[in-house]
Amino acid sequence: MEIPPKITLAIDAMGGDHAPHAIITGTELAVRLDPSITPILVGDEQKIRPLIKADSPLRDVRIHHTTDKVASDDVPSQALRSGKKSSMRLAIDLVKDGTADAVVSAGNSGALLIMALMVLRTIEGIDRPAMAAFFPTMNGRCCMLDLGANIECSATNLVQFAVMGDAFFRVTADTATHHAYKPSIGLLNVGEEEQKGSASIRDAAAILADPEINMNYYGFVEGSDFPMGGVDIVVSDGFSGNVALKTAEGTSRLIGTMIRQAFQSTLFSRLGYLLASRSFKKLRDMMNPQNYNGAVLLGLNGIVVKSHGSADPKGFANAIKVASDMHRNNFMEDVKIGIARSLKAIEMSQNNKASAE
């Protein structure tokens, strides 16, 4: 069995609703599953060290001490100014100076975005970073971006998101086949017809359909399509993507609540639940958001993974796995190659548009 190369991850130990306990326990779980991961815990050593037992895989872990942290309700601009010694900022700095290969944080999303952008900057050729995440579909999983980092987007932004989403989907898939696989990409729109949608969406569609960009562009998709597994990647502006994701999450909770209420209504329904309990456990596992935890800020000169603030240890361990998969499968290099191709296609599209005018 091939031993994976060592990877160093900067862990914001003080970020999240259940920090540092859930963060430490989740990191322990990730290291037990993949001993090649070397974490650096960034945070208050007096609070972190007592949580690490003598038989823990973290017993010799490096702790980058700081007592400062970014609170969940801190305004991002304020956190940027006053949080230079916070656990979140110092963890990002470890990626910037090359000490760590990636950073994982469950802290304040807005603060993480603005800090990472200011410290790491965007990859050359990318105008704006995007937030991406996976969620379950009938065919397995689907990646959606942007999820709120960019409220309004140009056609160029959407094309860049598609390139980054393509690389992200492949490097987090089966490592034996990810280089050869070409995930299908759909643009979120108000209809599937070519004339539907804003000018930026239609222009992005024309660029993504260009053979020069070498991507598996499916076409427009509606909000009701992608949960059924029609495409692997859904690209949208941050406003639409965030609304679609939150609507899906809310609908999932609604259905779960209605099912519980239905099976608690009578004695026979309770017996029916007991008979079908294994099937319902399988359904819960498929829909459990902890199994898909790990939103990623794509487009930066460094790998930044955002765990959900309320993630349990299993969820945080999954976010760590996302970070390690991205680094080991050369996500950064993959994106740079894709962006170079997209720039040619965008330039050709702009020239054709100018000639037509």
Image (tube, rainbow, N blue to C red):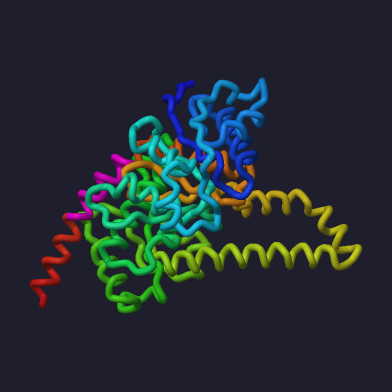
Using the image, determine if residue 212 lies above or below residue 170. below
Instruction: Please name the residue shown 60% across and 48% down the image.
Output: 311
Q: Position of residue 23 (x, y in %)?
A: 59, 39
Q: Which residue in the rendered view is the most extreme toward the left?
A: 355
Q: Is residue 218 left or right of residue 348?
A: right
Instruction: Please name the residue shown 22% across and 54% down the image.
Output: 342
- Decide if residue 355 is in sight here: yes
Q: Is residue 122 left or right of residue 37?
A: left
Instruction: Please name the residue shown 51% across and 53% down the image.
Output: 108
Q: Which residues are magenta?
A: 332-343
Using the image, determine if residue 109 lies above or below residue 201. above
Q: Is residue 333 magenta?
A: yes
The image quadrant that residue 20 belongs to is top right
Question: Camera-side residue: 164 or 114?
Answer: 114
Question: Camera-side residue: 22 or 234?
Answer: 22
What secondary structure is the magenta-colored segment mainly? helix
Q: Position of residue 334 (x, y in %)?
A: 30, 42
